[in-house]
Amino acid sequence: MGQIKIFTDSTSDLPPDLIAKYSIGVIPLYVVFNDQNFRDGIDLSPPELYSKVTQTGKLPKTAAPSPADFISAFSPYVEAGDQIIYISLSSELSSTYQNAIIASGEFPEGSVHVFDSLNLSTGIGIQVLKAAKAAESGQSADQILSLLEKIRPNVDTEFVIDSLEYLYKGGRCSGMQNLVGSLLKIRPVIKVLQGKMTPAYKVRGSRDKALDQMVNNALSNMDKMDKDTLFVVHTLAEQDAIAMSQLIKERTGVREVLLSDAGCVICSHCGPKTIGIIYITEE
């Protein structure tokens, strides 16, 4: 009898030990510098990405896996009789989900289930982790998909962007906004709402002030926070992430506060020293 194999993509930013523990399949997106394609997390690391941006003064582009990439990854498991649940990067942010849907049509009906996380980074990862634990406990594909439908709208994903430079270079804010924001030391805070990156508010002043605000926002949800798992995800901000995770664990009583490094695709859009807090609220 086949098993349920959980797949996700590289933007889920799950720590390698969790990927190994639950045998999660990871399909990489692509980071493109000029005519060179790099597989996220395989051919290129965030420090290497930042070095290339510094050298060239330009941001890379990012690209979804092709339907052929998905077919290649899924085929061995389907042939072995397994059922696949693939949890994707938000369909509002990438064609990754649509390409997975196209690929799923090449397999027998019901063998590949594609689920839109409507999230990014460990906002995907926290859903993947719930699915992997449910699969390990023996739940069916229908039960796992029902669980994902339930928790998806309750994933709270919030990031502090340290600099407007990457948003500016990526065409997500104007040159004047970048100049004014830099002069006034404005730190934008991004939330994921209905699958999209949405500016939630701006904090004027020090980085510490912005991080404190984000932590306080999470603590304000303490009473309705799922106490199983919370992620603190970062890129080149390990000390801040450790301090925040320790404080949150002490104050909330969450059983697992997990640190995660953002991958190259997320770094391409947010830049260094970005840090986020992700958790699930209970209904």
Image (cartoon, rainbow, N blue to C red):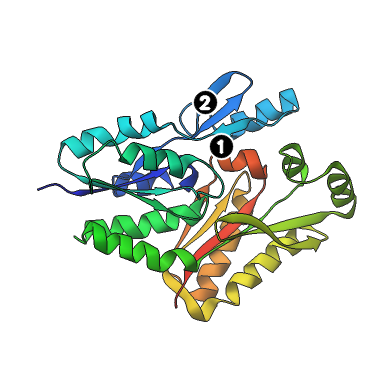
Which structural element holds mark 1?
helix
Q: Nearer the viewer, residue 253 or 219?
A: 219
Which structural element holds mark 2?
strand
Label 2 Cα crowd, 10 Å radius (few <14 / some 14-19 / many 20+): many
Image coordinates of residue 206 in percent, x first then y, are 80, 58
Residue drawn at (55%, 53%) of the image: 233
Q: Quick one: which residue is furthest to the left in this view?
A: 1
Mark drawn on residue 281: none
Q: Quadrant of residue 194?
A: bottom right
Q: Which residue is mark 1?
A: 264
Q: Quick one: which residue is furthest to the bottom in this view?
A: 223
How far apart are the alpha carbons under marks 2 and 1?
10 Å
**Type of amino acid under label 2:** Phe
Q: Which residue is mark 2?
A: 38
Residue drawn at (38%, 38%) of the image: 102
Image coordinates of residue 104 in percent, x first then y, are 32, 41
- The answer to whether residue 27 is above or below residue 12 is above
**Type of amino acid under label 1:** Cys
Q: Nearer the viewer, residue 241 or 136?
A: 136
- The answer to whether residue 33 is above or below residue 65 is above
Whether the residues at callouts 2 and 1 have beta carbons within 8 Å, the answer is yes
Q: Quick one: which residue is furthest to the top in this view?
A: 35
Total marks drawn?
A: 2
Q: Earlier in the sequence, mark 2 or mark 1?
A: 2
- The answer to whether residue 10 is above or below residue 59 is below
In the rendered image, is residue 229 in sight? no
